[in-house]
């Protein structure tokens, strides 16, 4: 059981994030790859196939050893400073790779307590050695591009719907409505939020407030950081239907070919532009930085797949008919 002790001051400092945290989504999706909930079964099969085709099986096993689906995985993989600070995977990854050596040593020691470390790589990470951290960054980015980015549109739709509903409830009933509506595994018994949890833990907010972060890939109960001195966050699973079948292009031969030609992130940008997006909105939807979103949109525009319209200080990107045909696998016939 996890018990979060909430003071009156904390109730005034509850913050509901508008979107998932990119690093939490990466780690929690990896947990679904290790042991999927039924909801993720089609995604599991398609992602396993895509990772195998990319030759990433060994990398996934290394990441799974570092972030097991157990009662603990290292907090530094989901940096609290990134929670809602910037909607970008790159920004969160920078925080991971800049973790101090003392923190790395503490987290890895806790992970391997009671047993041998599975590889010398763990020792290198615990010591903060740059080659090991660079390798970790490369593996996390590659996994994220294959397993998470292609499905950003579907996850964003579920999250936006869930957060919108909760936001309306807060306006009508106050901040306690968020605590009382986090799913069947949670109970709000003021002043304590009780959550069914694999270990016994008490978290005292002590006036620090609580950031509540929606997650598409979170499993059956909300989850928090292990170290009590870190900024308090609670990641919860958004409301979902009984089964999710990803869009055909995410798992089809055409979708795989599109990812191969454009790159997974650039293909995801093109898929997301079924409606117009500003650069900032596009970055938020795909969990990439605005700079990266602008760079991908520029490349797609140069290829005739995207148009960009300036509106005051911002721009709005939209897919061209050629871009739409490419996404849906419709070819053009040349006119003699």
Image (cartoon, rainbow, N blue to C red):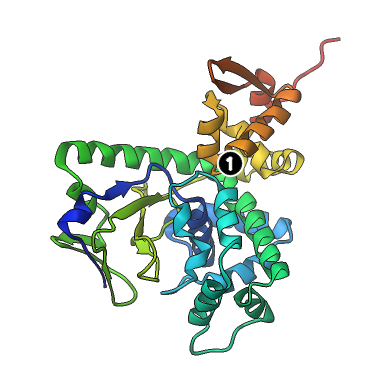
Report the residue at 52% width, 55% height from top.
Answer: 23
Asked if residue 307 can be seen in this view, the reply is: yes
Q: Quadrant of the C terminus?
A: top right
Q: Is residue 293 above or below residue 69?
A: above
Q: Looking at the rendering, which quadrant does residue 324 occupy? A: top right
Residue 57 appears in view: no
Which residue of the protein is positioned furthest toward the top in this rendering? 336
Query: Residue at point 52% right, 64% down?
Result: 77
Depth check: give the residue in front, 12 or 38: 12
> Going by the image, does 98 lie left or right of 80?
right
Report which quarter residue 272 is drawn in: top right
Q: Position of residue 327 (x, y in %)?
A: 65, 31
Residue 48 is situated, as x and y percent measured from the top left of the image, at 62, 59
Above or below residue 93? Residue 195 is below
Tell me the residue at 73%/68% (across/down): 131
Q: In the picture provided, is 84 more to the left or to the right than 27? A: left
| Mark 1 neighbour density, 10 Å: few (under 14) some (14–19) many (20 or more) | many
Residue identified by numbered label 1: 289
Using the image as rendered, state which of residue 269 and residue 251 is in the foreground: 269
Instruction: Tell me the element at label 1.
Output: loop
Q: Quadrant of the N terminus?
A: bottom left
Comparing 218 with 22, the one in front is 22
| Foreground of the two, 53 or 273 | 273
- Where residue 233 appears, x then y in whole percent? 36, 58
């Amino acid at each position: 059981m996890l018990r979060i002790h909430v003071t009156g001051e904390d109730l005034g400092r509850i913050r509901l994030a508008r979107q998932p945290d990119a690093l939490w989504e990466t780690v929690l999706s990896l947990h679904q790859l290790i042991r999927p909930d039924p909801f993720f079964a089609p995604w599991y099969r398609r992602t396993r196939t895509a990772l195998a085709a990319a030759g990433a099986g060994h990398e996934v096993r290394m990441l799974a050893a570092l972030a097991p689906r157990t009662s603990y995985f290292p907090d530094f993989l989901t940096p609290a400073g990134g929670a809602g600070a910037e909607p970008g995977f790159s920004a969160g990854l920078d925080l991971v790779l800049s973790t101090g050596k003392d923190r790395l040593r503490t987290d890895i020691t806790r992970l391997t307590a009671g047993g041998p470390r599975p590889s010398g790589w763990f020792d290198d990470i615990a010591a903060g050695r740059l080659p090991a951290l660079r390798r970790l960054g490369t593996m996390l980015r590659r996994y994220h591009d294959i397993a998470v980015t292609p499905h950003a549109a579907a996850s964003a739709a579920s999250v936006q719907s869930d957060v919108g509903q909760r936001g309306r409830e807060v306006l009508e009933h106050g901040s306690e409505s968020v605590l009382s509506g986090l799913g069947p595994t949670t109970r709000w018994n003021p002043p304590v939020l009780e959550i069914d949890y694999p270990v016994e833990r008490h978290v005292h907010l002590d006036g620090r407030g609580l950031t509540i972060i929606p997650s598409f890939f979170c499993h059956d109960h909300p989850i928090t950081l292990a170290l009590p001195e870190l900024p308090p966050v609670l990641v919860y699973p958004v409301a979902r239907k009984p089964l999710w079948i990803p869009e055909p292009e995410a798992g089809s031969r055409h979708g795989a070919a599109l990812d191969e030609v454009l790159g997974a992130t650039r293909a995801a940008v093109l898929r997301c532009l079924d409606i117009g997006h500003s650069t900032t909105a596009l970055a938020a939807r795909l969990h990439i930085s605005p700079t990266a979103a602008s760079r991908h949109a520029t490349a797609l525009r140069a290829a005739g797949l995207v148009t960009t319209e300036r509106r005051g200080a911002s721009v709005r990107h939209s897919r061209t008919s050629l871009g739409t045909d490419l996404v849906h696998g419709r070819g053009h016939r040349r006119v003699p």
